[in-house]
Amino acid sequence: MSEILVAARDDIPEGGARIIEIGNLEIGVIRHEDAFYAYRNFCPHQGGPVCEGIRMAGVYDDVDPEGLFHGQKFDKADMHIVCPWHGYEYRLKDGVNVCDARLKLRKYEVTERDGNVYITV
Amino acid sequence: MNVADRQVTKVRDLTTEPFNTSTHLAHAQQQADARGYEDFLIVDVDSHHYENEASTEIADYVENEVMRNEILYQGISRKGISTGFGQYQDLGGRLVRYPRRKSEEVPETPHRDITLMRRWMDAMGVDIACMFPTPLLNLGLSPRVDLEVELAMGYNRWLCERVLQEDHRLKSMLYLPFNDPEACLKVIEMFGDKPGVIGFMVTSTRYRGVYDNAYVRTYRMLEERGLPLGFHTGLGGQEPGLSTCNRFLTLHALGFAWHNMLHLSNWVINGLPERFPKLKVMWIEAGLAWLPFLMQRLDNEYMMRHSDAPLLKRKPSEYMREMFYTSQPMEMVDNARALELTFEMIGAETQLLYSSDYPHWDMDLPSVIYDLPFLTEGAKRNILGGNAQRVFNLDPVLSERKRARQAEKARASA
Ligand code: FES
């Protein structure tokens, strides 16, 4: 295990992302609502650059207890990473695919220290 | 390498990085290199460019000046020309190559479409690609038959002159204005021998039966010239039943299969394979999952209703096994058994042709075929390129990039 300096915290703006390449290994570091997340930039579908996609809130069908449909809404608390190749969506907080939980992004630990962001590889 | 010794070798700032096809597909290139695609030919039989971005150029090639004026004014992809329901395949901005493609920088020459095609082809390891339009795939639904003919002529002339003749890696099965059977003959005569033209394409979303006597001369002409006829399917959300699909997913899942199921069924049951035995017929972009279903369905009913299909000498599925299919979007990724059986049922080793459909949302890389555990290396290579080479009579020339890699490999092993 080694700790790798990603950037100074302020160098990654809110909503921004960075791809760190360590040899053949690409890791995406994403800043969202002041927290940092790091995943391998590799989608288990066809190998797409998953961290290079946009982040978008999950969509849900608003259905009331009677079973009536009231439209589609965004769930802002459930942010997704969207793979830019075909649109597979993964939960930002744990990297689990939202359609099939067997598909997961490889997650890396992120630490912040003295205004810097590090990942543990 | 010891993990502790690892050094950051590159940093990319996505906040400022411009969109570029080669970067977008860098992993595809890694796949291609890792699998050694430089050792064999890969032909992509269904890919696309956005002809609507060249609307003003195409307008110059449209002869009717009233229509040319209209196309100049509003382009060729908006309602009134190529209409369509549920057209939000870019997933509301989730697929970044849709909104960002327009900002991709290209050199002044060659034509923008050529540069973009080359970029993704090199990334994926594709040597030769058959390109189809995007919005014009809906043109067959226009009630304005004269417009379909004018635009087909203009688009075909533009594509031949500005794109195909400039790069031998780019091919097309040209648009047939199928609502005007006489014009189809003219199109084949005018363009059948042009460089890069490897067949002709009918868009499947339309309302005239393929068995109509009006098409007999078209089929005969293609058969005599040895040019394949492809049916490129589409959404067809205007169909009364399909128009109830309120989600793109349902419309796409059903519509793309439905329109080719319809024409293929009519094709076989009306005995067209017996009437045009040498005509190569290809079914494009409907995936594969519908094929076992249709084979079983048609065979079962044929046994009970011979008088509905008296021209047939064999079961419908046997004719279907002699037709050609493009691979994308290849379903059953989670069910290798179903996929393997499907491959067996359609005789995939000789009848299936790899297609990416790039840059559309559900594109497939060559690895979807190359990584299938149940195929032999020979079968993989047939599906990825060999079958297309035979069906279209292609010169199996590898891309410059692959040839360079081969030379590099040879040097390294010397
Ligand atoms: S590779 Fe990520 S969605 Fe297909």
Image (cartoon, rainbow, N blue to C red):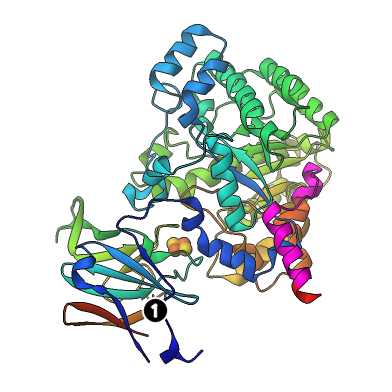
Q: Is residue B390 magenta?
A: yes
Instruction: Identify the image quadrant of residue B349.
Output: bottom right
Residue B376 in view (yes/no): no
Camera-side residue of B201 and B386: B386
The span picked out in magenta is B388-411
Left or right: residue B217 compared with residue A32: right
Q: Is residue B151 magenta?
A: no
Q: Is residue B218 above or below residue B134?
A: above
Task: Residue type at mark 1: give it.
Answer: Arg
Camera-side residue of B346 and A11: A11
Q: Chain of mark 1?
A: A
Residue drawn 77% across and 52% down?
A: B387
Residue B273 in view (yes/no): yes
- Residue B410 x %, y %: 78, 69
Task: Look at mark 1 in the image and give the residue it sits on.
Answer: A106
Q: Which corner quadrant of the figure contains ligand 1?
A: bottom left
The kind of secondary structure the magenta stretch mainly shows is: helix
- Residue B28 x %, y %: 55, 62
Residue drawn 34% across and 53% down?
A: B94
- Residue B283 x %, y %: 65, 44
The C terminus of chain B: image quadrant: bottom right
Left or right: residue B215 compared with residue A104: right
